[in-house]
Image (cartoon, rainbow, N blue to C red):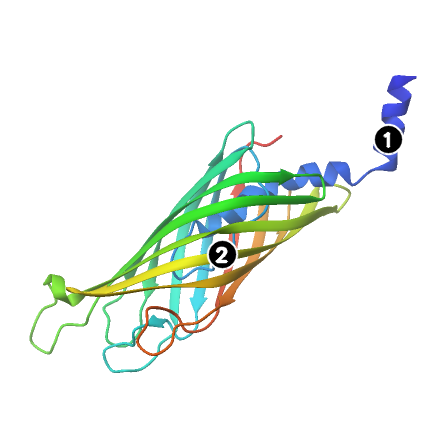
Amino acid sequence: MLAKRAGMRSAHHPWRRPARGLALLALAPAAAAAQLPGVPAAPGAFVRPGLAFAANAGLEARGLAPETVDGARRSRWTYGLAAAFAPASARWQLAGGAAAQTWGSGYQDPGTSFGGRAAFVVLDRPRFGATAVAGLGFARARFEPPAGGSAAEDEDVVQLRQLPLGVAVGARGGWGGGRRAWALSVAPQYVWYRFSAGEDAQSAARPRVGLLAEVGLTPRLGVSVAYEDGARAAGGEPGPRAGTVGLALSFALGGR
């Protein structure tokens, strides 16, 4: 009788399997972003055990303040790889990555970007989830050398550091007979920025919000689209002047 009742519960709630299946997808976007400057700070609300690897691209409209050497604003492209890991308990997750960047006029290409993020599960339900997140990102580029000169001195290097703290909350569900899944997450965060050029440095902090949409193409392969926006830098302050959009393709190992 107990077995029959268990079977009836499973039959009446077919979404439980897709929600579990979504755990295979939940690790991928965290690996994709990994808190890289130039990629949206839009962590997912769900964590799964195991490893995931991702290739990601981001476009930051109008780049980061301060302006480039010619006073113009440039969009910045980022292309990178990342990985993430969570233990069998799926109570926390670590992600990290590296990327190449184009900083636009006045800079040598490519610049570099590195980042890492930790996520801690606050709520884990079949349909809903929430995580607390903290990250650290670092980006570096070099000014173009003057004609006939070289850019080998420390004062020719510009660096960006960013430290976001926040939460991610979201909903998830299944499709394709329970072997595929989707998830939507929103992540309000407070981000501290520091921009330095040689010995000159400026710092500022402001609230930002990340939005993330995830779809599982197979039980292991996922694609995600992310967007980040919020309070923007004014004048010569460091930080984003517009929104950032990102796209990631990821592959997950392990799972529940």
Graded by Cα atoms within 10 Å as few (under 14), some (14 to 19) or many (20 or more), the crowding at tag 2 reads many
Q: State the residue lying farthest toward the bottom.
A: 71
Q: Position of residue 144 (x, y in %)?
A: 18, 72
Considering depth in this image, is 65 or 79 the residue closer to the camera?
Answer: 65
Q: Which residue is mark 1?
A: 9
Disc 1 and disc 2 in contact, CB within 8 angstroms: no
Q: Where's the N terminus, which quadrant?
A: top right
Q: Is residue 41 visible?
A: no
Question: Which mark's residue is nearer the viewer, 1 or 2?
Answer: 2
Circle 2 SS class: strand
Q: Which residue is mark 2?
A: 189
Residue type at mark 1?
Answer: Arg
**Apparent side of residue 61 relative to residue 177 in the rendered image (left or right):** left
Circle 1 SS class: helix
Q: Residue at x 88, y 18 (%)?
A: 2
**Image position of 248 with respect to 252: above or below:** below
**Apparent side of residue 17 relative to residue 53 in the rendered image (left or right):** right
Q: Position of residue 252 (x, y in %)?
A: 54, 39
Q: State the residue lying farthest toward the top.
A: 1
Q: Position of residue 62 (x, y in %)?
A: 40, 75
Q: Residue at x 68, y 45 (%)?
A: 128
* Lower sequence index among marks 1 and 2: 1
**Measured Cα–Cα span from mark 1 to mark 2:** 39 Å
Q: Quadrant of residue 94?
A: top left
**Image position of 12 with respect to 213: above or below:** above
**Apparent side of residue 122 relative to residue 194 in the rendered image (left or right):** right
Considering depth in this image, is 115 or 125 the residue closer to the camera?
Answer: 125
